[in-house]
Amino acid sequence: MTAIVLAGLLALAGPMSALAQKAGEDIEAGRANPEAASGFEAKNIVRAKRHMVVAANPYAARAGREILRMGGSAIDAAIATQLVLNLVEPQSSGIGGGAFILHWDKAQSELKTYDGRERAPKAAKPDLFLTPGGAPQRFFKTVASPQSVAVPGLLRALEMAHKSHGQLPWKDLFAPAIRLAEQGFKVSPRLHKLLGGRWARKFSPRAKEYFFNAGNKPWPVGHVLKNPEFADTLRHVAARGADAFYQGGIARDMVGALQAAVAKSGQAIDGMTAEDVKSYQAMPRPPVCTAYRSYKICGMGPPSSGGHTVAQTLKLVEKFDLGRDPMNPAALHIIAEAEKLAYADRARYSADPDFVPVPEGLLDPDYLNNRAKLIDLAKSTPKAQPGTPPEVAKGRFGRDATIENKGTSHISIVDRQGNAVAMTSTIESAFGSGFMVRGFLLNNEMTDFSFRPKDRSGRPIANRIEPLKRPRSSMAPTMIFAPDGELRMILGSPGGSRIILYVIKSIIAHIDWNANAAEAAAWPNFGSRNGPFEIESGQSAPASANVAGSAFNRSAFYERTRKYLEARGHKIRSGPMTSGAHIIILKNGVIEGGADPRREGRALGD
Ligand code: GLY
């Protein structure tokens, strides 16, 4: 065991923020926030020599490390980690949902990306989420409806990646999750807290039975929860591969549960069929790569908007000097203004590339040079407009109306051969749609589409619902390569459409301001999704942290930043920004891991 633990990186958190007191209620947004704050736990940086896994829960990180110690590859460890996450962090991801995977093959110097995004059923129509009067349905009601469930993609993507990059037999990777599901795991504070959210009222009867005690209360922290049904599901998939999930009894039960709910609601809506499930395919996709300063940044292309939006922002930021002082307000202004421009393009152009011609020119150097000229160092743009990248006919794409939620998890892994995985997985809202089948929850990824198919001018919205289409995502698993071509950084985060802000902050913190993996995750979150300047505040974040060796007082930082930005016309919105950035940095032969202090993650290495 060569992990070196450095103590005292961050000061201990203060009491929970008032904003975070009520489980899952995002007071500012006025609607359910499934990834609400649940406390701040200072995390030490972890250093290792051989391999490392960083994931959102200690049980899951241990499962990944167990596989790495057995000589498993990065993708082997990712599979074991993900299956345990499904069990112990069921609010965020699982086999009832989807994922995007970046895989780095060190020997071949090859980066591959796998799309395991959920897919709309064949019967899904553009007006699925409109009322008879043509207005968008209420978001929260839609989340908990059977129509919100898209065909899960996670297992097909894992299987595809394992076929190319696995070392250990597929079935061995299921052992840690099966064991834990049978023996039970301790309910964590975060799981307990999120079970107190109002969405839990909409759980299917089976989900209520599993998550609540006889008094209809969430199981307390520390309760040992067993899930033999899930163990049984995993045993089938371990033995027969993903076909056991996509064909046969498990698929029949998923479809049956949704059909029963449709019948009960009295609605005449066609939903997911056994054929939809059977025909699902994961897809290899080209990575989206760009140069930032002397580094190469690679991410996930469409149907995720993550890769392009991160890349566009960094290319715009690159044209400015961010200064040497970490998190200085002038730099934060530049980054937020760049994010506004990138989010404006994202909303207009990003969608499933098999249905919508996502413009290649989004990263065109001349286009971005012109976009950068829109950034005014002295004043904020209240709302950036999308640009017209080369080869886009003006007016072809409508104004987006997608509402996004935040139920997701991120895993970063490097194995002893230097192969790596960055995988972000999701079931969309906290606990997905609330439908539980065979021990796992089904996603509500259909609500990642725009409810309106057309904008007010009648132009089709790129991210509208269409049969067999994949909804746009914000997930941004990312790998960064150093000037010598070696892998430098593996990262990603949950957080709905704020994922992109969290990933950008972490990248700039490391590349521009030399933050280590734990600092890059812990430093205050901020940014703009083409609206107000959002800044993490209150006691959900630590009162103080060590920024690049100098004392850093969070309330002083907040006040200094607010004053500077308000003077430039920014509208400030503050509150919890619950990232779950899980970061590995490889430098000078040392592997450094940082887990986000806002969640329950761990970095474990040898
Ligand atoms: N469901 C979260 C995302 O795909 O961005």
Image (cartoon, grey):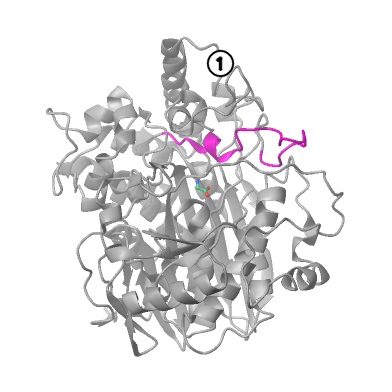
- The image position of residue 150, as x and y in percent, is 53, 33
In the rendered image, which quarter is residue 415 located in?
bottom left
Q: Is residue 132 above or below residue 293?
A: above
- The image position of residue 191, as x and y in percent, is 26, 47
In the rendered image, which quarter is residue 581 located in?
bottom left
Towards the viewer: 241 or 53: 53
Q: Which residue is mark 1?
A: 269
Q: Residue at x 78, y 47 (%)?
A: 357
Binning the other alpha carbons within 10 Å of mark 1 as few (below 14), some (14 to 19) or many (20 upward) gives: some
Q: Residue at x 48, y 55 (%)?
A: 424
Q: Tag 1: residue type? A: Ile
Locate residue 335 relative to residue 225 in the image: left or right.
right
Q: Which residues are magenta?
A: 442-463
Towards the viewer: 120 or 4: 120
Towards the viewer: 496 or 567: 567
Q: Is residue 259 above or below residue 193?
A: above
Query: Is label 1 in a helix, a strand or a loop?
Result: loop
Q: Is residue 80 magenta?
A: no
Q: Which corner quadrant holds the N terminus?
A: bottom left
Q: How many marks?
A: 1
Disc 1 residue: CB within 8 Å of ligand 1? no
Residue 118 appears in the figure? yes
- The image position of residue 103, as x and y in percent, is 55, 62
Q: Is residue 452 magenta?
A: yes
- The image position of residue 594, as x and y in percent, is 37, 72
